[in-house]
Image (cartoon, rainbow, N blue to C red):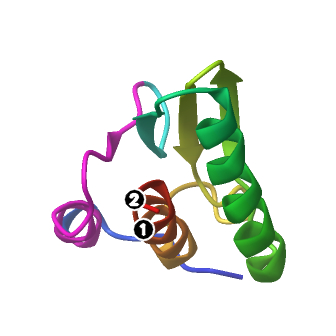
Amino acid sequence: MATLLTPEDLDTALGTLIGWARADKRDAICKTFKFADFNQAFGFMTLVAAKAEAMNHHPEWFNVYARVDVTLATHDAGGVTELDIELAGFMDEASAV
């Protein structure tokens, strides 16, 4: 099982990511991605789905047209772990493609 990040480690990790923040009312991180249209948003989700499946670590997300709202937490650990930071970094890279 992945180990929870300390508050200090989470702050450090968030400093390496673009636009990610602590979620309100739970131990998770979140970000809203905005794309030009639905096709770009869905393409992003497809790339992330393949990575998430390979990691066996899946995001909580919500899509409306060109917007994708993402929340990441490691449910087995009860909060944010390195798995979430790794997937968040991948999402940042995938959103720039």
**Residue 40: percent from left, percent from top:** 60, 41
Residue occupying image coordinates x 44% and y 37%: 33
Up-down relation of residue 72 to residue 42 (above or below): below
Determine the image quadrant of residue 16: bottom left
Residue hosting label 1: 93
Residue at mark 1 to residue at mark 2: CA–CA distance: 5 Å
Q: Give the secondary structure at mark 1.
A: helix
Q: Is residue 54 left or right of residue 62?
A: right
Residue hosting label 2: 96
Q: Amino acid at mark 2?
A: Ala
**Residue 7: percent from left, percent from top:** 26, 60
Q: Amino acid at mark 1?
A: Glu
**Residue 68: percent from left, percent from top:** 57, 32
Give the number of the disc on residue 79.
Answer: none
Asked whether 37 or 27 is in front, the reply is: 37
Up-down relation of residue 63 to residue 54 (above or below): above
Query: Which is closer to the viewer, label 1 or label 2?
Result: 2
Asked whether 16 or 45 is in front, the reply is: 45
Q: Is residue 80 left or right of residue 18?
A: right
Does the segment drawn in magenta span residue 18?
yes
**Residue 14: percent from left, percent from top:** 25, 60
Q: Mark 2, residues whose alpha carbon is within 10 Å: few (<14), some, or many (≥20)?
A: few
Quadrant containing the N terminus in the rendered view? bottom right
Q: Give the secondary structure at mark 2.
A: loop
Residue occupying image coordinates x 76% and y 55%: 46
User: Which stretch did the figure color magenta?
Assistant: 9-24
Q: Is residue 47 left or right of residue 95?
A: right
Asked whether 59 or 49 is in front, the reply is: 49
Q: Are marks 1 and 2 in contact (CB under 8 Å)?
A: yes
Determine the image quadrant of residue 57: bottom right
Residue occupying image coordinates x 69% and y 50%: 43
